[in-house]
Amino acid sequence: MPVIARYALVTLTPLSLLLLGATVWGGFAVIALVWLTLLAALLDGLLEKPHGDLADHEPWSDRLSVVLGLSHLVLLPVVLVALAGDGLGFGQKVALFFATASFFGQVSHPNAHELIHRRPWPLKALGAAVYTSVGFGHHVSAHRLVHHRFVGTTDDPNTPLPGESYWAYLPRAWAGSIRAGLEQEEDRLERRGLPDRGWRNPYWIWGGGALLSLVMATLVAGPVGFLGLVALGGLTGAQILLSDYIQHYGLQRLPLPNGRLEPVAPHHSWNAPRGFTSYMMMNAPAHSEHHMHPDRPYDRLDPEADVPMMPWSVPIMAMLATIPPVWHRVMDRRALRVMEAAQARIETGQTRPVQPSRPPAAAQQRPARPAADAAEDVIARVQSQLD
């Protein structure tokens, strides 16, 4: 079976089940929930991992992303109408809601993430529309302008602080990414001599689009539609930030002998390439490759690269992250080893110095925290738990 056909089979099947569950029979929603959870865990070790081909980029990969993006915009109102209607039983509605939330977090988000990195503006706009539909449009600005430039430093709100639990990280990263993305967009406009809060600022689109989504949800599905969209948006945002948390936990960019920070490297992201979930998440578990090559399409990422590996798949690690004592027991020792190896490479001169780009304005207004302090915090936090 061609690789792109595997991506299509794993992603379009739950999409079809959700649409059928919302319109034909609620049992399909239960099957979709099983597909996105239990079946994914069972088949991860059986299905072969995707293999990136640097010499070829299948046109069907972008076409699949477009289909998934447009289908997300159709699925959202269809599900809200079903939740507000009388055609489904209570249990079926619960299954439909959580299956949809899971699909948004595990398929729609990775796919929209791919789209906002594509060069053609229609693809970027579609990815932005997906995020905006669930009230997370600011991620388009924060991810591209902040996260990719400052990952592994305290100037990136989406990089977990040393020893930080997911529940402490979640509100800090959510509010911080909104502010940091806005500051970068304002800075871009100021450099062009334009008003920083003028109509060219995309935050008008992110905020206005979220408000429009709520209005439309209310019009098509009443109060249940309004509340359903708020709940789906909240769970989707929490999953987006959860993926950033687990993929960058405990990995800091260390200072070089000249005082500059080391460049973004493969050891600044955790990876978890598996057979089923890699296809379902558009190869997002090959996260180091994405940070090294942000413009590289998902079908060309190499899941076999020599990078830090999580012990289990992304969905399982995400579940563990919601239980901080278990998460720290599993990941702190691994993070310590990666940090110590990075420090050893620096001491032997294997990392070239690169100064990060201009940090967000909020970071400029507070005393800068040396990366060395962050590294020491990580090691101290880990060692204290291991003692």
Image (tube, rainbow, N blue to C red):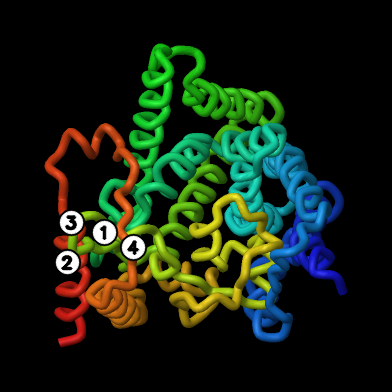
Q: Which of the marked residues, 3 or 1, is nearer the chain's N terminus?
A: 1
Mark 2 crowdedness (10 Å alpha carbons): few <14, some 14-19, many ≥20: some
Mark 3 crowdedness (10 Å alpha carbons): few <14, some 14-19, many ≥20: few
Q: Using the image, tell me which numbered label, if any, was put on residue 377.
A: 2
Q: Which of the marked residues, 4 or 3, is nearer the chain's N terminus?
A: 3
- CB under 8 Å between discs 1 and 2: yes
Q: CA distance from mark 4 to mark 3?
A: 12 Å
The residue tagged 3 is 259
Farthest-out residue, left: 367
Mark 1 crowdedness (10 Å alpha carbons): few <14, some 14-19, many ≥20: many
Q: Which of the marked residues, 1 or 2, is nearer the chain's N terminus?
A: 1
Q: CA distance from mark 2 to mark 3?
A: 18 Å
The residue tagged 4 is 352
Q: Nearer the viewer, residue 343 or 14?
A: 343
Q: Which quadrant holds residue 161?
A: bottom left
Please name the amino acid that badge 4 sits on: Arg
Of labels 1 and 4, the one closer to you: 4
Q: Which quadrant holds residue 257?
A: bottom left
- Quarter holding the C terminus is bottom left
Q: CA distance from mark 1 to mark 2?
A: 9 Å
Which residue is depicted at the point 49% across and 47% down?
237
Of labels 3 and 1, the one closer to you: 3
Q: Position of residue 26 (x, y in %)?
A: 78, 56
Q: Secondary structure at mark 4?
A: loop
Q: Which quadrant holds residue 179?
A: top left
The residue tagged 1 is 161
Query: Where 257 sits versus 219, above or below?
Result: below
- CB under 8 Å between discs 4 and 2: no
